[in-house]
Image (cartoon, grey):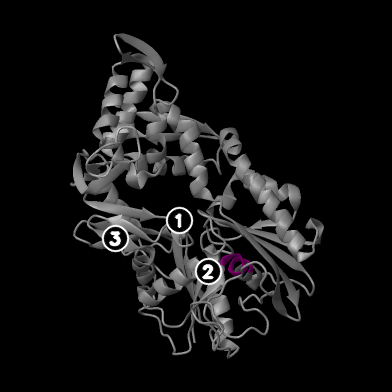
Amino acid sequence: MLGIGIDFGTTNSTVAVYDGQRLRYLPLEPVAGGEVMPTALYLSRDRQAEVGRAAIDRYTLDNSGRTVQLTAEEVGAITVTVAGTDATRGLEDGGSITHSFEVHAWTDQDLPGRLFRSVKRWLGSASVERVRVFDAHYRIVALATPVLSHLREALADEKRSASDVAFIGRPVRYEGRTADANEIAVARMTEACRHAGFRRMQLFPEPIAAARSYLEERPLAEGETALAFDFGGGTLDLSVVESRDGQLALRATHGVPIGGDEIDRRLYRAKVFPELGEGSRVHRPVLDEWREEDFPFDRFGDRLLNWALAYDLNRPELLEILVQGMREGGDAGRCLERLYSVVKGNLSYSVFQAIERAKVALSEVERSEIVVEDLDLRVPLERAELDAVVTPLLEQADAALEEVLASAGLAADDLSVVVRTGGSSRLDAVIRLLERRFPGRVVEHDPFTSIAAGLALASWEEVARGQRPRSPDGHAEGQRPRSPAGHAEGQRPRSPAGHAKGHR
């Protein structure tokens, strides 16, 4: 019998196994042999897929520094008929005028491949059903499946029994703007897991898994409570568990869609945009004179933040504006030359990587730099500046802590321990927030592996108890309290669609 834990994270993924005596993390990277793998997928033009670090390296090699040439591609036509106006009265054809317009889209015909990061954030979005990749439209499920398949293949050499169940992590609340975001995400994730080859699996709340792995070696006394604070790349997930009759009982969960990805975007805006020309004043020809005005950086900003589509900035009308601004000279001209290099060299992802490195460094030092050699870019970044960027998100985190404690019927002083995990939990501002609220009771626990470990432990316990594995149904608000295994007490097993068996 083997407990299997799969942490399919927004930023990184991990696989752990537990045989009742020993917990192990499986190597996921063929070359480096790393136990923590970037959650990344690269699809080449000939539809070959690579995952993990190899996907990022392939994207960087194939795309960064490549000159982008967009081509106008005809995608259809629009016909507009106008009637009932002064211009159409008395016309012989019944009083209408019809115009037809061809519609073109700019495409990068030489794009060698697409890199996908943070696909997990799309799972609950009803408006994102398919993504166009070259001449095909891929469902979100299809973009998650190759990474999940790679995680399952890591288990190939493990001795498994027919009763083993893979516990796969899920946030308390998936990202999405509609009320049914959780339901949509659970259905998509379940389908992707099935396509990836997981025949016996269950989705399990990630913060509960994090608490479970910590409490394996440091169990709570009867009646004591723990809060798991799981702050990752895409979401902040919270859970409160209590030791009751020798078992962990779930008292409350809560989640909000904030994480490291949003912090990186805010740093890009605050620290890098000004180095690319935001706020520059340039002279532009207007009729018969040159007028000084703000450079229209807003036409570039959103695409820079959406690095996967930044190649779209190579449209002729945008390049014309950019080249004209570069002629300004001085500081404005130098910044816009750097923006031109980002656009033509497809380097926005490289900027994000540099931001991530500088941000992580600030967990250890007071001052770091955002460095992109290809752009001659060196931007100082101080911890106080990072704190200022993070503060609005921490206000949301603070409110989430209030809500989960209220749901559990507890005060901050009632908690015995606060377990912080996830890469974003290492930020100094996050640590200070938790220490202020829960002085002397905050501990760090395996930021990148705790969830996989807790999932493996919970998987082993589920099978050891002889319980039948259940399909994922989540923790939507209003549902009955659940055990740490994720089941509402007395609830019937559910199908992947979320219906109790025998009911529609």
Residue at the image point whose x is 32% and y is 20% from the top: 325
Residue at 33 percent of width and 28 percent of height = 338
Mark seen at residue 183: 2
Q: Are marks 3 and 1 in contact (CB under 8 Å)?
A: no
Per the image, the residue denoted by label 3 is: 137
Q: Position of residue 425 (x, y in %)?
A: 59, 52
Q: Position of residue 490 (x, y in %)?
A: 67, 85
Q: Kindly report which numbered mark, 3 or 1, lies closer to the viewer in this rendering.
A: 3
Q: Is residue 208 magenta?
A: yes
Vertical order, 175 against 78 (above or below): below
- The CA distance from mark 3 to mark 2 is 23 Å
Q: Where does label 1 land, which residue?
A: 11
The reply to whether residue 20 is visible in this rendering is no
Q: Secondary structure at mark 2?
A: helix
Is 433 or 327 nearer to us in this picture? 327
**Tag 1's secondary structure?**
loop
Looking at numbered disc 3 in the image, what kind of residue is underneath it? His
Residue 108 within the segment the image draws in magenta: no
Q: Which residue of the protein is positioned furthest toward the top in this rendering?
A: 289
Q: In front: 235, or 321?
A: 321
> What residue span does the magenta drawing correspond to?
206-211
Q: Which mark is residue 339?
A: none
Q: Amino acid at mark 2?
A: Glu
Label 3 sits on a secondary structure element that is strand
Badge 1: few (under 14), some or many (20 or more) residues near its Cα, within 10 Å?
many
Q: Residue at x 74, y 47 (%)?
A: 436
**Mark 2 or 1, nearer chain start:** 1
Q: Position of residue 284 (x, y in %)?
A: 33, 16
Residues at marks 2 and 1, CA–CA distance in whole angstroms: 22 Å
How many numbered discs, if any? 3
Q: Dot 2: within a 10 Å radius of its alpha carbon, few (fewer than 14), some, or many (20 or more) residues?
A: many
- Which amino acid does the dot numbered 1 rest on? Thr
